[in-house]
Amino acid sequence: MEAVRGKSVYGGIAIGRVWVFDKGDSTVKRIHIEDTSAEIKRFENAKENAKEQLGALYEKALKEVGEVNAQIFEVHQMMLDDLDYVESIIHMIENQNVNAEYAVAVTGDNFSEMFAAMEDDYMKARAADVKDISNRLVSVLQGDEQGGISGDEPVIIVADDLAPSETVQLDKNKVLAFVTKHGSTNSHTAILARTMNIPALIGVDYPEDIDGKQMVVDGYNGSVYIEPDDATLKKFEDIRNEDRNKQKLLQELKGKDDITKSGRKIKLYANIGTVTDVASVLQNDAAGIGLFRSEFLYLGREDYPSEEEQFQAYKTVAENMAGKKVIIRTLDIGADKKADYFNLEKEENPAMGYRAIRICLTRHDIFKTQLRAIYRAARYGNISIMYPMIISVDEVRQIKKIVKEVKAELDSKQIPYGEVEQGIMIETPAAVMISDLLAKEVEFFSIGTNDLTQYTLAIDRQNPQLDNIYDSHHDAILRMIQMTVDNAHKENCWVGICGELGADTTLTDTFVKMGIDELSVTPSAVLKVREKIRACD
Ligand code: PEP
Ligand code: MG
């Protein structure tokens, strides 16, 4: 047994096999194949395997999130048997002598483009589904060669570093833990690990030859144990069982109100990055979504998501939340969240650079596409919108002008849309200092304590060397939260916290006393925050 220490980003215990994340793995190569019948057989087997996976996912989703949300897996199963789709793949293997992965990926892209171009909304929505089933098939096909994450067994992901765009692509049902050499506690990869409710460690100098080995990840203590001995294994199995029992106790809080002893109601919402995260929002019984980091729709791909694709994503989330509030944050790309196709110039200080609303206010095409998608989706649920990285009243007025234009354009084309509550993120010291003025402009504020801490303390949230002094409990931050709440309430503007600090239960009581109206936390933290709220006076 070998033990290595690192730094914990999220607690919990994981026990499983290591899967070393190879950045090159996700690309599909074109390989010349002689024996095309064997390749077709390989494809057929992969298809059956994928259908079995989907069947299991359907059963799981049925139990956890109900029939409406589970149905998508049945639809995917049927799509895998679609004659046109299957014949196109087989035809390509036979006639072009290519490997099955390549034929599936190309056919998936072609079909997806074809669906996306259709008039009918239902057919358009199938574009994302055909991509999804093709990705599943490719990963099954790659897995049968490499024994990788596409196998049935969930794994511990070990990597040098993981970008948010890479993390967001991993199949969340198959990841037990993240262990990386680099990275910082406040990065978006860390936030994703929390959303996934799995232990995560950074700064782990793991040995080279580790792929496939058994590992224990102790997310409480920041240690990993490679090929653990029996006593270590038993010790951590016991802790893991204790955790599960505690989780079971928290489950009893499902269905209960988020209300203090004196009867004050707090809105307890959850943060998501992708459409699939909605399942854990429902599972953890959050009263709404307080932050949908929409930029994740833009990551890990080659080109901008179309209006249609975004519309489908927002609509799906709104529908699945069935009338509960869904706050979509407009594109907050930049800093650690990068997409090459934006062609952004390299900057000295990207965290303080051309990002988020600054991009949207100069590239109206991108912004308007997103706004149109959000407004159209608002007919299918209770959608609010908020804008990131605001520093001035002028920015808010520019946004309002663009929103007005978007609505007028939709009107002129007779495209139906819904009403959308307007809010901004308070995550720069400038926004806090003029929160009295900003509150006159919008209906709500959501305090982004992650960036607010970074900008107030002048500490790069991505720099692991500074993790120990990145202190969201700093008096400066707490005073800023109080100031924001006071200024907002004078103008009847409600205020929430959607940064990671919102889930810090040592501060729940303080936030309630400060007059905070809403807390939006990672889905797995909802029940423990509910427990705290209910214990507040
Ligand atoms: C924040 O800054 O607190 C926030 C919620 O946004 P993000 O972490 O995505 O920057
Ligand atoms: Mg932020």
Image (cartoon, rainbow, N blue to C red):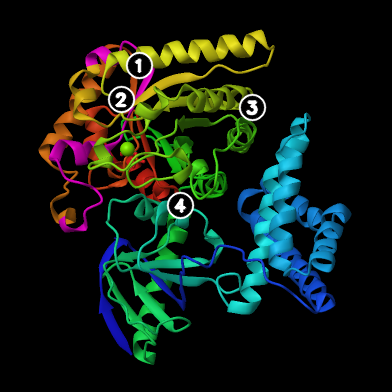
Q: Residue at x 28, y 47 (%)?
A: 505
Q: Which residue is mark 4?
A: 165
Q: Nearer the viewer, mark 4 or mark 1?
A: 4
Residue stretch in magenta:
436-465
The amino acid marked with disc number 4 is Ser
Assess whether mark 1 and mark 2 are in contact (beta carbons under 8 angstroms).
Answer: yes
Q: Are there few (<14), some (14-19), or many (20+) residues within 10 Å of tag 4?
A: many
Image quadrant holding the C terminus, namely: top left
Asked if one can make out residue 127 in the rendered structure from this viewpoint, the answer is yes
> Mark 2 and mark 4: span between their CA atoms?
24 Å
Q: Which of pointers 3 and 1 lies earlier in the amino acid sequence?
A: 3
Q: Which residue is mark 1?
A: 396
The amino acid marked with disc number 1 is Val
User: Does dot 2 land on a helix, a strand or a loop?
Assistant: loop
Assess whether mark 3 and mark 2 are in contact (beta carbons under 8 angstroms).
Answer: no
Q: Which residue is mark 3?
A: 380
Image quadrant holding the N terminus, namely: bottom left
Q: Which of pointers 4 and 1 lies earlier in the amino acid sequence?
A: 4
- Label 2 within 8 A of ligand 2 by Cβ: no
Q: Which of pointers 4 and 3 lies earlier in the amino acid sequence?
A: 4
Q: Which residue is mark 2?
A: 390
Residue 446, x across and y down, in percent: 34, 29
